[in-house]
Amino acid sequence: MLTDRSNAKGLQLFYAAVPLIISFILSLISFFAAVFIRGFYYHTNISEEQAADDGIVYLINYGLQIIIFGAWYLTVIRRNDLARVEKSNTPRKNEMEGTPPNHAERIKNDRSASAKNWHPVSYWAKRLPLLLVLGYALQLAVSGIIAALSAAFPSLFSGYKELIQSLAGDGVDWLTFTAVSFLAPIGEELLFRGVTLHYAKKALPVRWAILFQAVLFGIYHLNLIQFFYAVVVGYLLGMLADQAGSIVPGIVLHIIINLSAYLVPAVFLDNVPKAAFTAVLAIAIAVPCCILLLRKPRT
């Protein structure tokens, strides 16, 4: 019996890792699709180096993610909803004995059996300002830390700086901006906080499941520098998805973080003292925002 349970958990972890593998396949498909579009529609060639910075690649990649993982996620949600409704419609012991159930108790039980409920209007009224401040603070913190460390280890951060410049530099085209700022957060939240976290929570305690998807989120970026802060941000987004019972707040926060990369003044990062001060100040702002955002509602 114990072996069967362990095998079932291992299978759920495998399901949780499958979306990451699919995302790498989608990246390859997007590259070849961009080569085809550039060659046959725009009559221009694209090299491997150019493909890394090409907006069409990002647009196709994240578009495919939204379609595939969106359908997967909606299927999972519908299945959970049907299971919850079926469970709530099952006669309870006191009903079978002829005793009518307490209405308030039944509502409480139904809520605890499903994902945490959230009420969009009141949720956004209280938390949207926190999401805006937290998203920008996180981007400032990461930018400040990277700027300070890159001054001490320039060779280690040279490739990373080129990558960020290609994504958020002055010469970024509108396709890249749209894909990175809006489509990427939607696709990645569906992938990691939607599908991956769903299966991971079936095999692991909630906190470990959130960490599991955060590590996969770091691996997904295929960059050692990005790995470390992607794990931290991915864990935060996972906690937010679990607390809200929805990936929508995480999508909004993710969009704010990505958009903020275009809004960080270079003057904040042009030397080590400024970069360090920016990072410390941003962290001091981000921590209380996280506490307020993730605190449990009063019952």
Image (cartoon, rainbow, N blue to C red):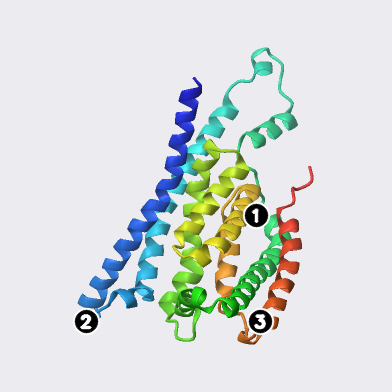
The structure residue drawn at horizontal position 72% and vertical position 16%, both measured from the top left corner, is: 99
Mark 3 residue crowding within 10 angstroms, few (<14) / some (14–19) / many (20+): some
Amino acid type of the residue that numbered disc 1 sits on in the rendered structure: Pro
Residue 293 in the image: above or below residue 226: above
Amino acid type of the residue that numbered disc 3 sits on in the rendered structure: Val
Q: Position of residue 268 (x, y in %)?
A: 66, 83
Quarter of image, res 129: bottom right
Q: Which residue is mark 2?
A: 43
The structure residue drawn at horizontal position 71% and vertical position 59%, both measured from the top left corner, is: 290
Q: Report helix, strand or loop for mark 2.
A: loop
Q: Report helix, strand or loop for mark 3.
A: helix
The structure residue drawn at horizontal position 29% and vertical position 62%, both measured from the top left corner, is: 29
Judge left or right: residue 34 versus residue 175. left
Residue 53 in the image: above or below residue 299: below
- Marks 3 and 1 sit apart, C-alpha to C-alpha, by 42 Å
Amino acid type of the residue that numbered disc 2 sits on in the rendered structure: His
Q: Report helix, strand or loop for mark 1.
A: helix
- Marks 3 and 2 sit apart, C-alpha to C-alpha, by 45 Å
Judge left or right: residue 217 versus residue 23. right
Q: Position of residue 22 (x, y in %)?
A: 37, 52
Q: Nearer the viewer, mark 3 or mark 1?
A: 3
Of residues 211 and 95, the one nearer the viewer is 211
Q: Which residue is mark 3?
A: 272
Q: Which residue is mark 1?
A: 120
Judge left or right: residue 140 versus residue 63. right
Residue 206 in the image: above or below residue 104: below
Sooner in the amino-acid sequence: mark 3 or mark 1 = 1
Give the number of the disc on residue 42: none
